[in-house]
Amino acid sequence: MATDPLLERLTAQSWPKPIGDHPAPRPGQLWRATWDGVVALVVVLSSPTGRRIEVAAASPELTGDESAIEIETTNSMRVVVWLSISSDIMMFTLDHRIGDLSEDAIQMLRGPDHTRHKWGPILSVLDDRAVERARLQGELAVMHDAEWLSVSGPQPTDVRALVASRGLKASEIARALSTTAGSARRLLQGGRELAPGEADLLAPLLGALPSSAVDFDPQLVEALDLPRFRPAIDERAANRFSRNEVAARRDLATAVLGMAARHRSPGERNWQLLVDEALRAD
Amino acid sequence: MDGVRDAVASGTIDVRFVDAARIAARMVVRGRPPPSGGTGWADDEIGDLVADMVARVGRDKVVLAAEKAVNDAQLSAWLRTALASQLDMAARSTASGRVLRSVEDALREDPDQFRLSNGHWGLVDDDQEPGWTEGISPLVTVAHTVPTRAVRISTASHKTPPMAYRPDIRKVATEVLSVAGPLAKDQLAEVVCARFDGGFSEVLGYLDEYELDSILGGDDDTELTDGLLAARWMLTQLTAEERAGLGAFLQTGGIRGMADQLGGTKYQSEVLYARLEEKLKTLQELAGADEAAVSHLLALVGQSEQLGHSHEDGRDGD
């Protein structure tokens, strides 16, 4: 088979390979984070605290402000880390690890060594670096504000309150849920709670995502936030929830709660094990 | 080219990437003369363009661009930008050569402040001898502390626009020379080049020479008033997103419409709006409060939109 000369030229040299795994995040790692169609590159600055993790924005573009430093990962990826743009983002937005910073790079993150800084401050919005800064700030804000638990806000998010505020009838709810009028009536009268996935089916009709009536155990939520479950949850979202990761996560959490209720063994529950089990059952 | 983003993001360079890069290259060479001087770009010339681009930006940047992309369309948009920059860099001499002339033009215009002696530019009232040995990096930092109206020196300019960024170059040179003392001409040009024409700007989609010619329609007999000159110069100072923003403003008649059409985060919308406001203010100042300058700029932006040289980041594609 004839080989492509351009392909031959390009592959004659080795290409850096992102690690692409999903370990527990640790300081000094470069990650891809993604949520709601937005992608960010981030460097982990400290160990996770609850559901959040402190990161700084990283960019492949070789530009920065006075806080920015150019660093290299052990797998030869060079990025600029903007230390002035940091945030405690939601851990579940972490998609996969791209690389680990070299020891030298980690030292640079720790110690303010101004001789290593290459760029001056951004004093005017006309400075092109202001565009890059805004892009990075926006990306981190998306990762910071991301949430898959019930949506909170000034509007009522309880399903009954939402139905009442819109003047909807049980028959309309039944149609949206593809269920019987009796089942819809029970839901509206408090005789039953929303089943997994029903909140998302009702959202277009109600104009808002009704809050899940189920209170998820905080430790279950933390377990589900772990990056190691992200690939399977993404797959679940693609296959069963039209790529809606919020719906896929809430449905999975409900399924895990159901499994936990059936496990009557004494002692603390191992939520990660239960999540594994629920994903295997998919 | 399904799956090219995923493949490159995992460090796999195969026929999918090569095909995507070739398609992107064919798109950006349209209307540009091939290196051989023939009528069309040969396959090996396209191959050279792609390979040269990869060598310039670095293999890790290609992989990171794939990591950063949401989908194949975004990676293709990145490839088109990188390949267009590669063509621009090959087409012009050297950035610093062009900037060298711009610096000369600007500083010679003000002999009361700048003097040229033994190939070094210095400040007239500065007694220091040439002897800066710390490299240009700290001077670039100093240069960035000077707010200016121009964000870049156009790659398309054959000479420095006298009313536009010469005052900005003088402001930057004054600050840099006051720190460094007299500097060799090429050193000062390098600092100015880094300040106004940094590598980063190339990803923002400023118009290149060919695109500008397409929009302006080459030589015409229109009398070039100050307003028209300023508008044409300002067109070179707008990023692709800013041109798209003004285009959307024209279509929708409002800022809200502009933001809705472009998408992006609130940070990006705020910066876009603030930059456009500043740039339009500058345009009016340059044109002596001539409203026609803004109208002319909007007409040019409309033309650039029709030519398809606008915002293309693949945000909506897949």
Image (cartoon, coloured by chain):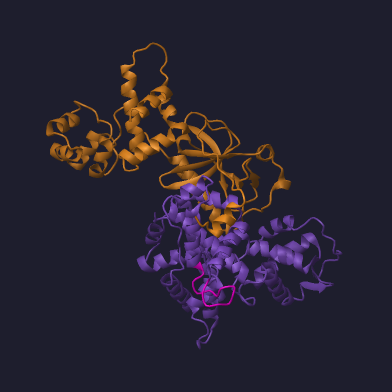
Chain colours: A orange, B purple
| Quadrant assignment for the N terminus of chain B | bottom left
Identify the residue at horizontal 39%, vertical 26% (top origin): A275
Q: Is residue A267 visible?
A: yes
Q: Residue furthest front?
A: A1
| Quadrant assignment for the C terminus of chain B | bottom left
Image position of B63 (left or right of A262): right
| Magenta-span inclusion, residue B71 | no
Q: Is residue B231 visible?
A: no
- Where on the picture, by quarter, is residue B189? bottom right
Identify the residue at horizontal 34%, vertical 13% (top origin): A264
Residue A200 in percent (x, y) is at 28, 39
Between A11 and B115, the residue placed more toward the observer is: A11
Residue A265 in percent (x, y) is at 37, 12
Image position of B250 (left or right of B164): left
Q: Is residue B304 above or below residue A45?
A: below
Residue A103 in percent (x, y) is at 68, 36
Between B96 and B131, the residue placed more toward the observer is: B96
Residue span colored magenta: B28-41
User: How many numbered marks appear?
Assistant: 0
Image position of A36 (left or right of A19): left
The main secondary structure of the magenta stretch is loop
Q: Is residue B23 above or below residue B285?
A: above
